[in-house]
Amino acid sequence: STIGVIFDLDGVIVDTAKYHFLAWKDLADELGFEFTEAHNELLKGVSRVRSLEILLDIGNVKLSEEKKQEYLISKNEVYLGYITKMGPDEILPGAEDLLNNLDALEVKYVLGSASKNAPLILKQVGLLDRFAAIVDGNSVSKAKPDPEVFLIGAEKLGLPPEKCIVFEDAIAGVEAAKAAHMVSIGIGDQETLSHANFNFNNLTEIPEDFFAQFISE
Ligand code: B16
Ligand code: MG
């Protein structure tokens, strides 16, 4: 096909933010400060290391590098406890229909996520084999809003960035797509993601003929 699609994972294909929240809240409880769902919004699309820094800022807590490494590991262990219980019922509404639509159009798609747990999550929900490639937190050195993750995605698709369409739920993710010169689709709150080229509340809202406008004969 003349176009390709790059999907973010958390907030687009599945809602793992709720499990990140529970795991980070555990840590905040241990460190003795409050961590709310509103605080959790700040961690969406952000790398694990950066998330810890934001969390510690919220609690006004300073830690040694050693302690930070320890907490990064224990947070992830708690998080893994949740995601290893995930199943196909946790795929967000509209996601499978959208992938089916792309298959029918013979449009290739890859994953472009900040998560180091992305392959495991996709395996849990039964979608791992559907993506042409997985670009995740293990394959990038610079986190969103840096465009690296999406530029590697374009390489995997064998397409120039201008021919790639990115689905994102996070501000940093839409910024990364823009920096990569790709078409950005904001999924979620329109006001938060007003810098995206297109906005939808969720994947069920994407019209069946949506991709036709990008495909040249
Ligand atoms: P992990 P995405 C992101 O996923 C999450 O939105 C973000 O909250 C998380 O900190 C990040 O992955 C790293 O996740 O700890 O599993 O490596 O939206 O980029 O798919
Ligand atoms: Mg996301």
Image: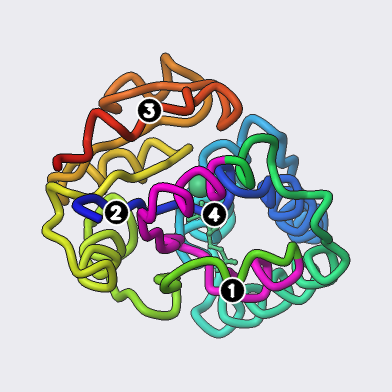
Q: Secondary structure at mark 2?
A: strand
Lower sequence index among marks 4 and 3: 4
- The answer for how far apart the CA atoms under marks 2 and 3 are is 13 Å
Which span is picked out in magenta?
Answer: 98-124
- Residue 193 position, x and y percent, is 38, 25
Tags 4 and 3 in contact by the CB under 8 Å rule?
no
Q: Residue at x 57, y 81 (%)?
A: 69
Q: Quadrant of residue 1?
A: bottom left
Residue 44 visible in the snapshot: no
User: Looking at the picture, which amino acid does disc 4 mark?
Assistant: Leu
Q: Residues within 10 Å of mark 1 (few under 14, many from 20)?
A: few
Q: CA distance from mark 1 to mark 2?
A: 17 Å
Residue 79 location, x and y as percent? 75, 66
Identified at 33% across, 19% down, the residue is 194
Q: Residues within 10 Å of mark 4 (few under 14, many from 20)?
A: many
Q: Which mark is residue 9?
A: 4
**Which residue lies most toward the bottom here?**
66
Q: Which residue is mark 2?
A: 4
- Whether tag 2 and tag 3 are in contact, CB under 8 A, the answer is no
Indicate yes or no: mark 1 CB to ligand 1 under 8 Å: no
Residue identifier under label 1: 129
